[in-house]
Image: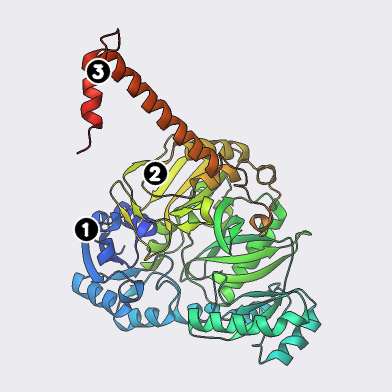
C-alpha cells in the first residue's frame, strides 16, 4: 500500500480523500492557498503546505509547486480529486517525470477523453451509440449550416475542449447559426484557450444518466450501477440519486456493459464515469467520459457498499480489484443534495461571509461530506459547493422522506445556501414520481411563491417594532405614575441590555 499521499485539492473532496487515506494507514499531505489557511482539509492532514495566494491560478492550478511540495514532503503519490488538475494531461506527465504516482488514468487517456471530438470518434469506432452530429470540427458558418441541415434542427454547438456548459449554444433555426458560432467560439476561447467547436443533434426531453466504473491495471473493469443526474441548472448538477427511476435491470446491464467496453477501448485505469443521454424511448447515447472521481460518487457508495476512493488508492498501489461484476448488488436508494453557498431566492447568486453557526443533520441513513465548520470564511475564489448531504433508504420513498428530515435539521447561519431549494424540490410532484429531465428547472420555478413577499416581511418587521415601542412606553408610563406595573427588576434589566453602547 502507498505510504504517503499528497491531496492536491481543497474543500469537502479533499477531506473525503484524506479520510480514506487515514483508514488505510497512509500518511497525508495537504496543500492550501492563503484563503484556505484555516480550512478543514488543512487541519485534517498530517502535514500542510502553502502553495500561493487565493486565486486558483496562483495556487491549486500550480502543478509545478504541487510537485515540488510532494517531493519535499516525501509523498509517493498525488490524488487530484476532481476539478483543478484532475483532468490535466500535462500535469499527469509532470508527475510521471517526477517519479510520482498520479492517482488516475494515463495522460493519453485523459487527453483523448478530454477532447470531445476524439472521444466521439473513439466511442463510435468501439460500437458505442453516440449522439448524432459531427465527428470533425466546424470550420465556418457554411459548414455549420450544412451539418445542421443534415442532422436537423434544433442542434447544439459545443466546445471540443469544453465542460460545464461553457462554449455551448442551442440553435433552433438557420438564422441563429452565425451568432451562436461567434458566441460559442469566444466563450470557449476564454474558458479553455481553444475555440474548436463541433455540432450535435439537440435531444429534447432527455435524462442525464451516468455509469460508475472501476478499472485496474490488469484489465479488470466493473460497473457499479447508474446515477440519475438530470436535476441541473445551467448544466450544473444539483441533485443526484442512485439507482435511476428510468432504468430497469436489463437497461442497467446494457448500459453497464457498454460503459465497460468504452473504458477498455481507451485502456482506462482507476475510477471513472461514462455519461449517457437517455431519451423518452430509453435509447441512450454516449455523452462524455469523466476521467476522475465524480462529486456524486457518494450515492454509488451507499447503494453498492463499495468505497470508491479506497479502491482508487489500492489500484494506484498496483493491486487488483477486489470485486467482480457478479459481486456488485444494488441495495436500497441513495439521494445526494449539493449544499452550495448560493442564494436560491436571488437567482443563485454567490453568498460569502463567515459561517457563525452550523448544525449538521444525523441519524439513520444520513451522511454529510463537508468542508466547512463554524467560523469558516466562505469566499468568492472557489466553487460554491461547501458540503454534500447524502441519504440512504430502503426505498426511494424512504430516502426522500429522510432527505426532507435531514434538510430541515441542517442549519447554516451566516451565509445563504441552497437548502431551501432542495426542500422545495423534494416536494414537487414530478420529482416524487421520478418524471424529470434535464430541462426541468428551465420550465419550473420550484421556489415560486415560496414564503412571504418582501412587502409582507417589511410590514411584519414594522408591526413588531410598533408593538415593542407601545409596550415599552406603557411600562415606562406605569412606572412614572406609580400605577401597578411589571416587576422593576425586569424592566431595569431590559433597559440595561437595550441601552446603546
* x, y percent for residue 171: 72, 76
Q: Earlier in the sequence, mark 1 or mark 3?
A: 1
Disc nearer the start of the sequence (2/3): 2
Tell me if label 2 and label 3 are in contact, CB under 8 Å.
no
Q: Which dot marks residue 46?
A: 1
Q: Secondary structure at mark 1?
A: loop
Locate residue 274 relative to residue 107 in the image: left or right: right
- Among the 4 quarters of the image, the one containing residue 60: bottom left
* Label 1 to label 3: alpha-carbon separation: 53 Å
Q: Secondary structure at mark 2?
A: strand
Q: Name the residue tied to disc 3.
A: 490
Residue 282 location (% of width, % of height): 75, 59
Q: Earlier in the sequence, mark 2 or mark 1?
A: 1
- Is label 2 or label 3 in front? 3
User: Which label number is shown at residue 378?
Assistant: none
Residue 270: x and y in percent read 46, 67
Frontmost of labels 2 and 1 is: 2
Query: Is 342 situated left or right of 70 in this image?
Result: right
Residue to which mark 2 is pinned: 412
Q: Answer with the quarter of the image where residue 140 lies.
A: bottom right
Residue in the picture at 74% in, 60% down: 205
Looking at the image, can residue 263 be seen?
Answer: yes
Q: Residue at x 39, y 41 (%)?
A: 360
Q: Based on the displayed image, in which of its 4 quarters is residue 257 positioned? A: bottom right
Query: Which quadrant of the figure contains the N terminus?
Result: bottom left
State the residue lying farthest toward the top: 484
Assign a secondary structure to mark 3. helix
State how far apart marks 2 and 1 are (Cα).
28 Å
Q: Nearer the viewer, residue 308 or 33?
A: 33
Amino acid at each position: 500500500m502507498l505510504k504517503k499521499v499528497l491531496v492536491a485539492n481543497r474543500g469537502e473532496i479533499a477531506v473525503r480523500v484524506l479520510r480514506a487515506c487515514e483508514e488505510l494507514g497512509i500518511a497525508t499531505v495537504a496543500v492550501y492557498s492563503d484563503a484556505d489557511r484555516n480550512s478543514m482539509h488543512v487541519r485534517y492532514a498530517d502535514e500542510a503546505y502553502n502553495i500561493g495566494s487565493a486565486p486558483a491560478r496562483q495556487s491549486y492550478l500550480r502543478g509545478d509547486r504541487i510537485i515540488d511540495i510532494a517531493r519535499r514532503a516525501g509523498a509517493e503519490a498525488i490524488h487530484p480529486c476532481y476539478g483543478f488538475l484532475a483532468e490535466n494531461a500535462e500535469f499527469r506527465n509532470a508527475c510521471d517525470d517526477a517519479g510520482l504516482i498520479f492517482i488516475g488514468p494515463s495522460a493519453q487517456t485523459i487527453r483523448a477523453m478530454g477532447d470531445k471530438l476524439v472521444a466521439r470518434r473513439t466511442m463510435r469506432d468501439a460500437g458505442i451509440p453516440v449522439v448524432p452530429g459531427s465527428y470533425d470540427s466546424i470550420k465556418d458558418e457554411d459548414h455549420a449550416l450544412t451539418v445542421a441541415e443534415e442532422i436537423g434542427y434544433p442542434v447544439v454547438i459545443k466546445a471540443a475542449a469544453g465542460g460545464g456548459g461553457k462554449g455551448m449554444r442551442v440553435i433552433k433555426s438557420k438564422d441563429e447559426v452565425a451568432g451562436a458560432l461567434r458566441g460559442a467560439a469566444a466563450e470557449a476561447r476564454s474558458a479553455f484557450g481553444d475555440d474548436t467547436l463541433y455540432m450535435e443533434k439537440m435531444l429534447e426531453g432527455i435524462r442525464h444518466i451516468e455509469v460508475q466504473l472501476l478499472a485496474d491495471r490488469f484489465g479488470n473493469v466493473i460497473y457499479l450501477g447508474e446515477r440519475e443526474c438530470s436535476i441541473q441548472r445551467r448544466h450544473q448538477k444539483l441533485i443526484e440519486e442512485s439507482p435511476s427511476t428510468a432504468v430497469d435491470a436489463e437497461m442497467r446491464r446494457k448500459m453497464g456493459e457498454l460503459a465497460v467496453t468504452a473504458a477498455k477501448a481507451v485502456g482506462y485505469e482507476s475510477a471513472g464515469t461514462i455519461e449517457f443521454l437517455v431519451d423518452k424511448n430509453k435509447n441512450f447515447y454516449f455523452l462524455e467520459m469523466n476521467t476522475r472521481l465524480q462529486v456524486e460518487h457518494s450515492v454509488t457508495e451507499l447503494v453498492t457498499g463499495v468505497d470508491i476512493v479506497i479502491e482508487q488508492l489500492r489500484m494506484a498501489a498496483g493491486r487488483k480489484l477486489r470485486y467482480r461484476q457478479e459481486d456488485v448488488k444494488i441495495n436500497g436508494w441513495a439521494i445526494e443534495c449539493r449544499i452550495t453557498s448560493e442564494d436560491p431566492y436571488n437567482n443563485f447568486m454567490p453568498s460569502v461571509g463567515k459561517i457563525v453557526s452550523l448544525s449538521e443533520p444525523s441519524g439513520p441513513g444520513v451522511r454529510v461530506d463537508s468542508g466547512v465548520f463554524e467560523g469558516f470564511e466562505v469566499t468568492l475564489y472557489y466553487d460554491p459547493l461547501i458540503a454534500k448531504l447524502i441519504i440512504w433508504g430502503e426505498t426511494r420513498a424512504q430516502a426522500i422522506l429522510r432527505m426532507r428530515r435531514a434538510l430541515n435539521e441542517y442549519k447554516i447561519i451566516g451565509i445563504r445556501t441552497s437548502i431551501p431549494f432542495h426542500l422545495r424540490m423534494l416536494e414537487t410532484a414530478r420529482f416524487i414520481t421520478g418524471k424529470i429531465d434535464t430541462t426541468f428547472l428551465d420550465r419550473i420555478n420550484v421556489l415560486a411563491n415560496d414564503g412571504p413577499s418582501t412587502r409582507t416581511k417589511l410590514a411584519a418587521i414594522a408591526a413588531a417594532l410598533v408593538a415593542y415601542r407601545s409596550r415599552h412606553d406603557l411600562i415606562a408610563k406605569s412606572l412614572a405614575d406609580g400605577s401597578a406595573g411589571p416587576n422593576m427588576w425586569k424592566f431595569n434589566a431590559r433597559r440595561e441590555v437595550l441601552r446603546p453602547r
